[in-house]
Image: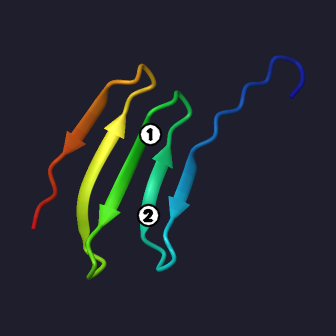
Amino acid sequence: MSGGDAYAFTGFGYNLVDGLTQVVYPLGRTVVAGYDSAGRLANVFGVRASGIAESYGVLS
């Protein structure tokens, strides 16, 4: 970076069957997804950059 350029990156994590397991946003928020034994989305939770945890419902 030069001349005051700023870059932001979003990171993604995947399991062995290409299911999205984690997203890390540029400002520090992290969202994590969990799957059941059949590979279906089972839970999603997030952690804000401030450390506050949040849980999200999963529709079935």
Q: Name the residue under label 2.
A: 20
Q: In this view, does 5 lie above or below 41?
A: above
Residue type at tag 2: Leu
Task: Identify the residue under disc 1.
Answer: 30
- Which mark is drawn over residue 45? none
At a point 11% along the width and 61% down the height, the residue shown is 59
Its colouring scheme is rainbow
* Quadrant in which the N terminus is drawn: top right
Q: What element carries label 1?
A: strand
- Picture quarter containing residue 31? top left
Q: In this view, does 40 lie above or below 58?
A: below
Residue sitting at x 40%, y 24%: 51
- Residue furthest to the left in view is 60
State the SS at label 2. Answer: strand
Tell me which amino acid carries mark 1.
Thr
Q: Where is residue 26 in the image (x, y as percent from the top left)?
A: 56, 33
State the residue lying farthest toward the front.
37
Check the image and report above or below for 11 versus 26: below
**Closer-to-camera residue (25/4):** 25
Identity of the residue drawn at 14% across and 50% down: 57
Which residue sits at x=53%, y=58%? 13
Q: Where is residue 21 in the image (x, y as percent from the top left)?
A: 43, 60
| Quadrant for the C terminus in the image | bottom left
Q: Could you tell me how far apart the alpha carbons at marks 1 and 2 are, in whole angstroms?
A: 13 Å
Query: How many numbered marks, from 0 up?
Result: 2
| Image position, residue 38 (x, y; %) | 26, 82
